[in-house]
Amino acid sequence: MKVVRLSRRQRLLANCAPISEERMNDRAMRAAVFSARRSGEFANQQSFDRAMAALVQSVPIPPEIGEWFSSENLVPRSKWKWKMAQNPAVLAVAIALAVIAGVFVIQFLEHRHDFPGAEAARKLLMVAASTRSVLLDPVRTDAGALGDLFFMKHQLEHYDVPPEFADFRTLGCRVFDDDEGHRVAQIWVIEKGMQFFIFPAERNAKTGAALSFSGRRYVEQEGWTGVVQERNGVCFMAALHGREKDLAPYVSKTKE
Amino acid sequence: MLGDARKAQEVLQATLRSANGETLSDPFWLFRDARWRCLETSEHGLQAEQVDFQEHDLSPSAPAQIERLDVNQLAIWISAAPEPQRTALALFYLDEFNHREILSLAELKIGELSRLLANGRRQFQAWLNTTVPQKEAK
Protein backbone atom coordinates (compact mmCIF):
# COMPACT_ATOMS: atom_id res chain seq x y z
CA MET A 1 0.00 0.00 0.00
CA LYS A 2 1.42 3.38 -1.01
CA VAL A 3 2.21 5.61 1.98
CA VAL A 4 1.80 9.35 1.51
CA ARG A 5 3.09 11.90 4.02
CA LEU A 6 0.40 14.40 4.96
CA SER A 7 0.56 17.27 7.40
CA ARG A 8 -1.46 16.92 10.61
CA ARG A 9 -4.07 19.37 9.29
CA GLN A 10 -4.31 17.47 6.00
CA ARG A 11 -4.76 14.18 7.86
CA LEU A 12 -7.60 15.70 9.89
CA LEU A 13 -9.28 17.02 6.76
CA ALA A 14 -8.75 13.81 4.77
CA ASN A 15 -10.58 11.89 7.50
CA CYS A 16 -13.57 14.19 6.93
CA ALA A 17 -13.29 14.14 3.12
CA PRO A 18 -16.81 14.47 1.70
CA ILE A 19 -18.33 11.53 -0.11
CA SER A 20 -19.66 13.58 -3.03
CA GLU A 21 -17.35 15.83 -5.06
CA GLU A 22 -19.99 18.56 -4.99
CA ARG A 23 -19.53 18.96 -1.21
CA MET A 24 -15.83 19.67 -1.70
CA ASN A 25 -16.20 23.46 -1.88
CA ASP A 26 -13.33 24.29 0.45
CA ARG A 27 -9.82 24.98 -0.84
CA ALA A 28 -8.00 23.41 2.14
CA MET A 29 -10.16 20.29 1.83
CA ARG A 30 -9.48 20.01 -1.91
CA ALA A 31 -5.74 20.29 -1.28
CA ALA A 32 -5.86 17.64 1.46
CA VAL A 33 -7.89 15.25 -0.69
CA PHE A 34 -5.58 15.85 -3.67
CA SER A 35 -2.55 14.88 -1.55
CA ALA A 36 -4.27 11.95 0.15
CA ARG A 37 -5.56 10.46 -3.12
CA ARG A 38 -2.16 8.94 -3.80
CA SER A 39 -2.46 6.64 -0.77
CA GLY A 40 -4.15 3.26 -0.82
CA GLU A 41 -5.46 3.84 2.69
CA PHE A 42 -7.43 6.88 1.51
CA ALA A 43 -8.78 4.90 -1.46
CA ASN A 44 -10.10 2.29 1.01
CA GLN A 45 -11.66 5.05 3.11
CA GLN A 46 -13.46 6.55 0.11
CA SER A 47 -14.76 3.15 -1.08
CA PHE A 48 -15.94 2.46 2.46
CA ASP A 49 -17.69 5.85 2.73
CA ARG A 50 -19.35 5.53 -0.67
CA ALA A 51 -20.70 2.08 0.21
CA MET A 52 -22.03 3.40 3.54
CA ALA A 53 -23.67 6.41 1.85
CA ALA A 54 -25.27 4.13 -0.74
CA LEU A 55 -26.72 2.03 2.06
CA VAL A 56 -28.04 5.14 3.82
CA GLN A 57 -29.62 6.31 0.57
CA SER A 58 -31.57 3.07 0.46
CA VAL A 59 -33.43 3.95 3.69
CA PRO A 60 -37.13 3.95 2.75
CA ILE A 61 -38.73 7.38 3.26
CA PRO A 62 -42.48 7.57 3.99
CA PRO A 63 -44.33 9.23 1.07
CA GLU A 64 -45.64 12.21 3.11
CA ILE A 65 -42.15 13.01 4.39
CA GLY A 66 -40.64 12.55 0.93
CA GLU A 67 -43.22 14.93 -0.52
CA TRP A 68 -42.42 17.60 2.07
CA PHE A 69 -38.68 17.25 1.50
CA SER A 70 -38.99 17.50 -2.26
CA SER A 71 -40.94 20.77 -1.96
CA GLU A 72 -38.44 22.43 0.37
CA ASN A 73 -34.90 23.52 -0.19
CA LEU A 74 -33.45 21.88 2.90
CA VAL A 75 -29.95 23.20 2.68
CA PRO A 76 -30.06 26.51 0.86
CA ARG A 77 -26.63 27.23 -0.49
CA SER A 78 -25.53 30.66 -1.55
CA LYS A 79 -23.69 30.52 -4.84
CA TRP A 80 -21.30 33.27 -3.82
CA LYS A 81 -19.51 32.88 -0.55
CA TRP A 82 -17.05 35.20 1.18
CA LYS A 83 -14.63 32.28 1.29
CA MET A 84 -14.71 32.19 -2.49
CA ALA A 85 -13.84 35.88 -2.57
CA GLN A 86 -10.75 35.17 -0.46
CA ASN A 87 -9.41 32.74 -3.06
CA PRO A 88 -6.18 34.35 -4.41
CA ALA A 89 -7.18 33.63 -8.02
CA VAL A 90 -10.60 35.25 -7.59
CA LEU A 91 -8.99 38.13 -5.70
CA ALA A 92 -6.40 38.64 -8.47
CA VAL A 93 -9.09 38.70 -11.16
CA ALA A 94 -11.19 41.12 -9.10
CA ILE A 95 -8.23 43.46 -8.58
CA ALA A 96 -7.32 43.30 -12.28
CA LEU A 97 -10.91 44.14 -13.25
CA ALA A 98 -10.95 47.00 -10.74
CA VAL A 99 -7.70 48.40 -12.16
CA ILE A 100 -9.00 48.13 -15.75
CA ALA A 101 -12.26 49.81 -14.70
CA GLY A 102 -10.26 52.52 -12.93
CA VAL A 103 -8.16 53.17 -16.04
CA PHE A 104 -11.32 53.44 -18.14
CA VAL A 105 -12.89 55.88 -15.67
CA ILE A 106 -9.74 58.03 -15.60
CA GLN A 107 -9.54 57.98 -19.41
CA PHE A 108 -13.20 58.92 -19.63
CA LEU A 109 -12.84 61.78 -17.13
CA GLU A 110 -9.72 63.05 -18.88
CA HIS A 111 -11.22 63.00 -22.34
CA ARG A 112 -14.86 63.89 -21.68
CA HIS A 113 -14.16 67.53 -22.58
CA ASP A 114 -11.97 66.64 -25.54
CA PHE A 115 -12.25 68.55 -28.80
CA PRO A 116 -10.56 68.29 -32.22
CA GLY A 117 -6.91 69.14 -31.64
CA ALA A 118 -6.92 68.35 -27.89
CA GLU A 119 -4.18 65.76 -28.31
CA ALA A 120 -1.96 68.21 -30.21
CA ALA A 121 -2.62 70.85 -27.55
CA ARG A 122 -1.51 68.46 -24.78
CA LYS A 123 1.71 67.70 -26.66
CA LEU A 124 2.36 71.43 -26.98
CA LEU A 125 1.88 71.84 -23.23
CA MET A 126 4.69 69.33 -22.80
CA VAL A 127 6.76 71.45 -25.19
CA ALA A 128 5.91 74.51 -23.07
CA ALA A 129 7.06 72.72 -19.91
CA SER A 130 10.44 71.85 -21.46
CA THR A 131 11.11 75.10 -23.38
CA ARG A 132 13.95 77.35 -22.24
CA SER A 133 14.10 80.99 -23.29
CA VAL A 134 17.38 80.47 -25.17
CA LEU A 135 15.54 78.30 -27.69
CA LEU A 136 13.47 81.26 -28.89
CA ASP A 137 14.50 84.20 -31.01
CA PRO A 138 14.41 87.27 -28.77
CA VAL A 139 11.63 89.57 -29.93
CA ARG A 140 10.32 92.43 -27.78
CA THR A 141 7.04 93.64 -29.17
CA ASP A 142 3.28 93.26 -28.70
CA ALA A 143 2.11 89.68 -29.29
CA GLY A 144 -0.50 90.93 -31.77
CA ALA A 145 2.25 92.19 -34.07
CA LEU A 146 3.74 88.74 -34.58
CA GLY A 147 0.92 87.58 -36.89
CA ASP A 148 2.45 89.69 -39.67
CA LEU A 149 5.91 88.31 -38.92
CA PHE A 150 4.68 84.70 -39.20
CA PHE A 151 2.93 85.48 -42.47
CA MET A 152 5.80 87.47 -44.01
CA LYS A 153 8.70 85.30 -42.87
CA HIS A 154 7.12 81.82 -42.69
CA GLN A 155 4.06 82.15 -44.98
CA LEU A 156 1.77 81.10 -42.15
CA GLU A 157 -1.67 82.44 -42.94
CA HIS A 158 -4.12 83.20 -40.10
CA TYR A 159 -1.42 82.60 -37.44
CA ASP A 160 -2.80 85.56 -35.49
CA VAL A 161 -2.91 86.26 -31.77
CA PRO A 162 -6.52 86.93 -30.63
CA PRO A 163 -7.27 90.54 -29.53
CA GLU A 164 -7.53 89.66 -25.80
CA PHE A 165 -3.88 88.50 -25.82
CA ALA A 166 -2.61 90.90 -28.50
CA ASP A 167 -1.32 93.57 -26.09
CA PHE A 168 0.94 91.24 -24.09
CA ARG A 169 4.65 92.06 -24.40
CA THR A 170 6.75 89.27 -25.84
CA LEU A 171 10.17 87.92 -24.85
CA GLY A 172 10.73 85.71 -27.87
CA CYS A 173 9.20 83.51 -30.50
CA ARG A 174 9.99 80.68 -32.90
CA VAL A 175 8.39 78.50 -35.55
CA PHE A 176 9.03 74.76 -35.53
CA ASP A 177 7.60 71.53 -36.94
CA ASP A 178 5.81 69.18 -34.56
CA ASP A 179 5.97 65.33 -34.66
CA GLU A 180 3.52 65.23 -37.54
CA GLY A 181 5.25 67.93 -39.55
CA HIS A 182 2.73 70.66 -38.77
CA ARG A 183 4.10 74.20 -38.49
CA VAL A 184 3.74 75.56 -34.97
CA ALA A 185 4.38 79.10 -33.85
CA GLN A 186 5.45 79.58 -30.24
CA ILE A 187 5.51 82.94 -28.45
CA TRP A 188 6.82 83.61 -24.95
CA VAL A 189 5.29 86.64 -23.21
CA ILE A 190 6.36 88.50 -20.06
CA GLU A 191 2.93 88.20 -18.37
CA LYS A 192 3.18 85.33 -15.86
CA GLY A 193 5.66 83.47 -18.14
CA MET A 194 2.76 82.61 -20.42
CA GLN A 195 3.37 80.92 -23.76
CA PHE A 196 1.20 81.11 -26.85
CA PHE A 197 1.02 78.37 -29.47
CA ILE A 198 -0.54 78.76 -32.88
CA PHE A 199 -0.98 75.54 -34.82
CA PRO A 200 -3.16 74.01 -37.55
CA ALA A 201 -6.56 72.70 -36.46
CA GLU A 202 -7.14 68.94 -36.70
CA ARG A 203 -8.44 67.93 -40.10
CA ASN A 204 -10.88 65.32 -41.34
CA ALA A 205 -8.78 62.40 -42.60
CA LYS A 206 -11.03 61.89 -45.67
CA THR A 207 -12.02 65.38 -46.74
CA GLY A 208 -9.10 67.37 -45.34
CA ALA A 209 -11.52 69.95 -43.95
CA ALA A 210 -10.56 71.59 -40.65
CA LEU A 211 -12.56 70.28 -37.70
CA SER A 212 -13.82 73.41 -36.03
CA PHE A 213 -15.22 73.83 -32.53
CA SER A 214 -16.86 76.77 -30.85
CA GLY A 215 -15.76 78.72 -27.78
CA ARG A 216 -12.72 78.05 -25.64
CA ARG A 217 -11.60 74.68 -24.34
CA TYR A 218 -9.20 73.93 -21.53
CA VAL A 219 -6.53 71.25 -21.53
CA GLU A 220 -4.10 70.23 -18.79
CA GLN A 221 -0.80 68.38 -18.90
CA GLU A 222 2.14 68.12 -16.52
CA GLY A 223 0.99 71.03 -14.33
CA TRP A 224 0.40 73.31 -17.32
CA THR A 225 -2.99 74.54 -18.41
CA GLY A 226 -3.93 75.79 -21.84
CA VAL A 227 -7.02 77.48 -23.24
CA VAL A 228 -7.61 76.76 -26.91
CA GLN A 229 -9.77 78.46 -29.53
CA GLU A 230 -10.10 77.78 -33.24
CA ARG A 231 -10.52 80.29 -36.05
CA ASN A 232 -10.04 79.91 -39.82
CA GLY A 233 -8.60 76.40 -39.49
CA VAL A 234 -5.93 77.53 -37.03
CA CYS A 235 -5.87 76.96 -33.27
CA PHE A 236 -4.54 79.41 -30.76
CA MET A 237 -3.55 78.24 -27.28
CA ALA A 238 -2.51 80.42 -24.35
CA ALA A 239 -0.69 78.29 -21.78
CA LEU A 240 0.73 78.90 -18.33
CA HIS A 241 2.15 76.84 -15.51
CA GLY A 242 -0.83 76.57 -13.20
CA ARG A 243 -4.47 75.69 -13.18
CA GLU A 244 -7.60 76.70 -15.02
CA LYS A 245 -8.39 79.39 -12.41
CA ASP A 246 -5.03 81.09 -13.16
CA LEU A 247 -5.96 81.40 -16.83
CA ALA A 248 -9.58 82.34 -16.29
CA PRO A 249 -8.97 86.10 -15.61
CA TYR A 250 -7.32 86.48 -19.04
CA VAL A 251 -10.08 84.61 -20.81
CA SER A 252 -12.81 86.68 -19.15
CA LYS A 253 -11.34 89.78 -20.77
CA THR A 254 -12.67 88.51 -24.09
CA LYS A 255 -13.37 91.16 -26.64
CA GLU A 256 -15.61 89.03 -28.80
CA MET B 1 -29.97 8.67 15.05
CA LEU B 2 -32.75 6.72 16.81
CA GLY B 3 -32.61 3.32 15.14
CA ASP B 4 -36.40 3.34 15.03
CA ALA B 5 -38.30 4.58 11.96
CA ARG B 6 -41.50 5.32 13.89
CA LYS B 7 -39.75 7.47 16.51
CA ALA B 8 -37.77 9.22 13.79
CA GLN B 9 -40.96 10.09 11.95
CA GLU B 10 -42.53 11.50 15.13
CA VAL B 11 -39.47 13.63 15.79
CA LEU B 12 -39.42 14.95 12.25
CA GLN B 13 -43.11 15.83 12.33
CA ALA B 14 -42.66 17.63 15.66
CA THR B 15 -39.78 19.57 14.14
CA LEU B 16 -41.80 20.52 11.06
CA ARG B 17 -44.70 21.65 13.22
CA SER B 18 -42.47 23.97 15.24
CA ALA B 19 -40.62 25.33 12.19
CA ASN B 20 -42.91 28.36 11.57
CA GLY B 21 -40.53 30.18 9.27
CA GLU B 22 -37.47 29.57 11.46
CA THR B 23 -35.71 28.02 8.48
CA LEU B 24 -35.58 31.45 6.88
CA SER B 25 -33.25 32.90 9.49
CA ASP B 26 -31.08 29.78 9.90
CA PRO B 27 -30.91 27.36 6.97
CA PHE B 28 -29.80 24.58 9.31
CA TRP B 29 -32.40 25.24 11.98
CA LEU B 30 -34.41 22.19 10.90
CA PHE B 31 -31.45 19.86 11.34
CA ARG B 32 -30.35 21.41 14.65
CA ASP B 33 -33.85 21.10 16.07
CA ALA B 34 -34.30 17.54 14.78
CA ARG B 35 -30.94 16.56 16.25
CA TRP B 36 -31.81 17.90 19.71
CA ARG B 37 -35.20 16.22 19.60
CA CYS B 38 -33.51 12.92 18.66
CA LEU B 39 -31.06 13.24 21.56
CA GLU B 40 -33.92 14.05 23.93
CA THR B 41 -36.00 11.12 22.68
CA SER B 42 -33.13 8.66 22.91
CA GLU B 43 -32.53 9.64 26.55
CA HIS B 44 -36.04 8.44 27.42
CA GLY B 45 -35.81 5.08 25.67
CA LEU B 46 -33.57 2.07 26.22
CA GLN B 47 -29.94 3.10 26.57
CA ALA B 48 -27.24 1.29 24.63
CA GLU B 49 -24.62 -0.37 26.77
CA GLN B 50 -21.31 1.43 27.01
CA VAL B 51 -18.84 -0.99 25.48
CA ASP B 52 -15.34 -0.63 24.13
CA PHE B 53 -15.61 -1.28 20.45
CA GLN B 54 -12.90 -3.20 18.71
CA GLU B 55 -11.16 -1.42 15.87
CA HIS B 56 -9.91 -2.94 12.61
CA ASP B 57 -8.12 -1.37 9.66
CA LEU B 58 -10.40 -0.60 6.74
CA SER B 59 -10.47 -3.51 4.34
CA PRO B 60 -10.58 -3.24 0.54
CA SER B 61 -13.48 -5.71 0.69
CA ALA B 62 -15.51 -3.44 3.02
CA PRO B 63 -17.83 -2.23 0.20
CA ALA B 64 -18.76 -5.84 -0.58
CA GLN B 65 -19.38 -6.50 3.13
CA ILE B 66 -21.54 -3.36 3.45
CA GLU B 67 -23.58 -4.36 0.40
CA ARG B 68 -24.65 -7.49 2.23
CA LEU B 69 -25.98 -5.50 5.19
CA ASP B 70 -29.59 -4.61 5.82
CA VAL B 71 -30.15 -0.88 6.20
CA ASN B 72 -31.71 -1.44 9.65
CA GLN B 73 -28.50 -3.05 10.87
CA LEU B 74 -26.60 0.10 9.93
CA ALA B 75 -29.25 2.32 11.58
CA ILE B 76 -29.10 0.31 14.80
CA TRP B 77 -25.31 0.37 14.83
CA ILE B 78 -25.16 4.16 14.38
CA SER B 79 -27.92 4.79 16.92
CA ALA B 80 -25.96 2.76 19.47
CA ALA B 81 -22.84 4.90 19.02
CA PRO B 82 -22.16 7.36 21.85
CA GLU B 83 -22.75 11.06 21.36
CA PRO B 84 -21.32 13.03 19.60
CA GLN B 85 -20.04 10.19 17.41
CA ARG B 86 -23.61 9.22 16.56
CA THR B 87 -24.42 12.72 15.28
CA ALA B 88 -21.13 12.93 13.36
CA LEU B 89 -21.69 9.59 11.60
CA ALA B 90 -25.36 10.28 10.88
CA LEU B 91 -24.69 13.71 9.36
CA PHE B 92 -21.61 12.55 7.46
CA TYR B 93 -23.20 9.51 5.80
CA LEU B 94 -26.35 11.46 4.98
CA ASP B 95 -24.04 13.05 2.38
CA GLU B 96 -25.92 16.35 2.39
CA PHE B 97 -23.36 18.53 4.17
CA ASN B 98 -19.75 19.58 3.75
CA HIS B 99 -17.40 19.22 6.70
CA ARG B 100 -17.84 22.85 7.84
CA GLU B 101 -21.60 22.42 7.98
CA ILE B 102 -21.22 19.23 10.00
CA LEU B 103 -18.89 21.03 12.41
CA SER B 104 -21.51 23.73 12.88
CA LEU B 105 -24.46 21.34 13.26
CA ALA B 106 -22.71 18.92 15.60
CA GLU B 107 -20.89 21.71 17.48
CA LEU B 108 -17.54 20.03 17.01
CA LYS B 109 -14.00 21.06 16.15
CA ILE B 110 -12.24 19.64 13.11
CA GLY B 111 -9.92 17.47 15.25
CA GLU B 112 -12.88 15.97 17.08
CA LEU B 113 -14.89 15.30 13.92
CA SER B 114 -11.85 13.73 12.27
CA ARG B 115 -11.22 11.42 15.24
CA LEU B 116 -14.90 10.47 15.58
CA LEU B 117 -15.22 9.55 11.89
CA ALA B 118 -11.89 7.69 11.74
CA ASN B 119 -12.68 5.70 14.89
CA GLY B 120 -16.25 5.12 13.68
CA ARG B 121 -15.02 3.61 10.42
CA ARG B 122 -12.54 1.32 12.17
CA GLN B 123 -15.14 0.23 14.73
CA PHE B 124 -17.70 -0.39 12.02
CA GLN B 125 -15.13 -2.42 10.07
CA ALA B 126 -14.50 -4.55 13.17
CA TRP B 127 -18.25 -5.10 13.58
CA LEU B 128 -18.54 -5.86 9.85
CA ASN B 129 -15.80 -8.44 10.08
CA THR B 130 -17.83 -10.19 12.78
CA THR B 131 -21.25 -9.78 11.14
CA VAL B 132 -20.29 -10.32 7.49
CA PRO B 133 -16.92 -12.07 7.43
CA GLN B 134 -14.70 -11.03 4.56
CA LYS B 135 -14.57 -14.54 3.03
CA GLU B 136 -18.35 -14.62 3.00
CA ALA B 137 -18.60 -11.20 1.37
CA LYS B 138 -16.25 -12.20 -1.45
Image (cartoon, grey):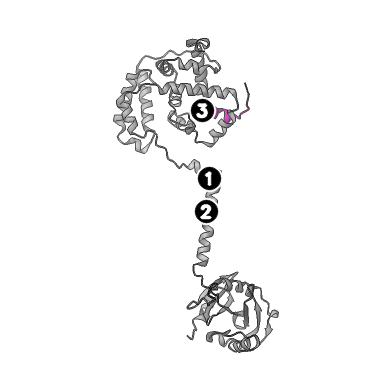
Residue B17 horizontal side relative to residue B128, left or right: left
The span picked out in magenta is: A3-15
Residue A16: give its label.
Answer: 3
Quadrant of the rendered image containing residue A205: bottom right
Look at the numbered disc 1 and give the secondary structure of its residue. Answer: helix
**Mark carried by residue A98:** 2
State the predominant SS element of the stretch in magenta: helix
Q: Position of residue A126 (x, y in %)?
A: 62, 72
Give the chain of mark 3.
A
What amino acid type should be assigned to the residue bearing mark 1?
Val
Q: Amino acid at mark 3?
A: Cys
For marks 1 and 2, give the CA distance: 12 Å
Q: Is residue B89 above or below residue A157?
A: above
Circle 2 residues within 10 Å: few <14, some 14–19, many ≥20? few
- Which mark is first along the chain, 2 or 3? 3
SS label for mark 2: helix
